[in-house]
Image (cartoon, rainbow, N blue to C red):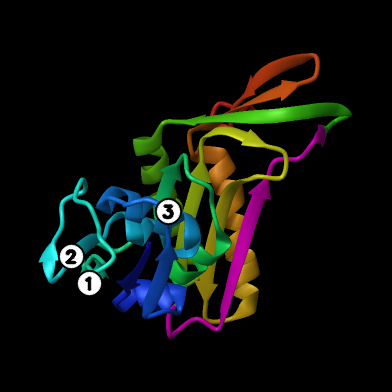
């Protein structure tokens, strides 16, 4: 079957499409539709997840079936339902999503820091990593870092996302985006952001090697004494 979905506002901007067609071999529910669209448009995934679906001009329930003759529209959240600037998530991370969050008319530069899972650390071969966090405190500390940055570099907008769970080699574990009026401030603020994140944000990783494993906390914790 073939169904067409209308996009509006932020979703239309993010996907650069006003309408999208899905070709399916089964009858989907509204929940199925949301899942399919988040996979197809990762750049707009968080907004799509929070959107409502309308069928023939009425809001639909998650378990409602969709037919080929239905008029389908995705209704994005209005102001107040904007994507959070700071998050801890089990979902894959995408730099484009954070760039969109910090982009603004005053920005002359947008820089991103992307942390990925490397295979070798000090001669040890990592097979995968497991990340864990204290999400509520982590987000609070990210907000504190953003406040510090805005005091040091005025008119800077910051977004941070950290992934938790099991991550394979080359997967993205953390992304930081900073938007500044000028590029010099962008480089400085970006470096400051990742260094402070490693100092005060409660995130831990377990390194799983070929012959062992170890939990590792902040590289620079408040408990670290000067040597």
Q: Residues within 10 Å of mark 2 (few under 14, many from 20)?
A: some
Q: For this view, does 150 lie left or right of residue 129?
A: left
Q: What residue is pinned by disc 3?
A: 25
Image: 128 above or below 91: above
Q: For this view, does 183 lie left or right of residue 57?
A: right
Please state which of the two labelled residues, at mark 3 or mark 2, is closer to the viewer: 3
Decide: marks 2, 1 in contact (CB < 8 A)?
yes
Residue 197 coordinates in the image, percent (x, y)? 54, 45
Q: Quadrant of the N terminus?
A: bottom left
Distance of label 3 from label 1 (alpha carbons): 18 Å
Q: For this view, does 33 lie left or right of residue 164?
A: left
Q: So how many labels did they put on this image?
A: 3
Question: Does the magenta run of residues contain 111?
Answer: yes
Residue 37 picture quarter: bottom left
Distance of label 3 from label 2 (alpha carbons): 20 Å
Q: Earlier in the sequence, mark 3 or mark 2?
A: 3
Q: Quadrant of the C terminus?
A: top right
Name the disc covering residue 200, or none.
Answer: none
Which range of residues does the magenta coloring cover? 104-120
Residue 92 coordinates in the image, percent (x, y)? 53, 47
Q: Earlier in the sequence, mark 3 or mark 1?
A: 3
Of 25 and 84, which appears nearest the observer?
Answer: 25
Please state which of the two labelled residues, at mark 3 or mark 1, is closer to the viewer: 3
- Is residue 155 at all visible to an observer of this figure? no
Q: What residue is pinned by disc 2?
A: 55
Question: Does the magenta run of residues contain 38?
Answer: no
Q: Going 16% across and 51% down the picture, which residue do you hit?
A: 61
Q: What residue is pinned by disc 1?
A: 71
Quick one: SS at disc 2?
A: strand
């Amino acid at each position: 079957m073939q169904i067409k979905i209308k996009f509006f506002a932020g979703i239309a901007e993010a996907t650069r499409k006003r309408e999208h067609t899905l070709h399916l071999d089964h009858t989907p529910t509204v929940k199925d539709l949301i899942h399919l669209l988040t996979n197809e448009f990762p750049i707009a995934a968080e907004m799509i997840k929070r959107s409502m679906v309308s069928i023939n001009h009425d809001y639909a329930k998650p378990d409602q079936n969709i037919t080929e003759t239905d008029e389908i529209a995705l209704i994005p959240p209005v102001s107040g339902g904007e994507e959070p600037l700071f998050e801890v998530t089990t979902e894959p991370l995408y730099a484009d999503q954070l760039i969109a969050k910090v982009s603004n008319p005053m920005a002359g530069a947008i820089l991103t820091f992307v942390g990925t899972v490397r295979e070798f650390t000090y001669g040890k071969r990592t097979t995968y990593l497991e990340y864990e966090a204290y999400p509520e405190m982590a987000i609070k500390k990210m907000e504190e870092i953003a406040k510090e940055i805005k005091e040091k570099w005025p008119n800077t907008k910051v977004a941070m996302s950290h992934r938790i769970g099991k991550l394979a080699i080359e997967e993205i574990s953390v992304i930081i985006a900073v938007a500044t009026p000028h590029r010099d401030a962008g480089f400085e603020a970006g470096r400051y952001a990742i260094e402070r994140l490693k100092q005060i944000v409660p995130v831990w990783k377990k390194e799983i090697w070929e012959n062992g494993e170890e939990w590792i906390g902040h590289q620079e914790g408040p408990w670290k004494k000067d040597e």
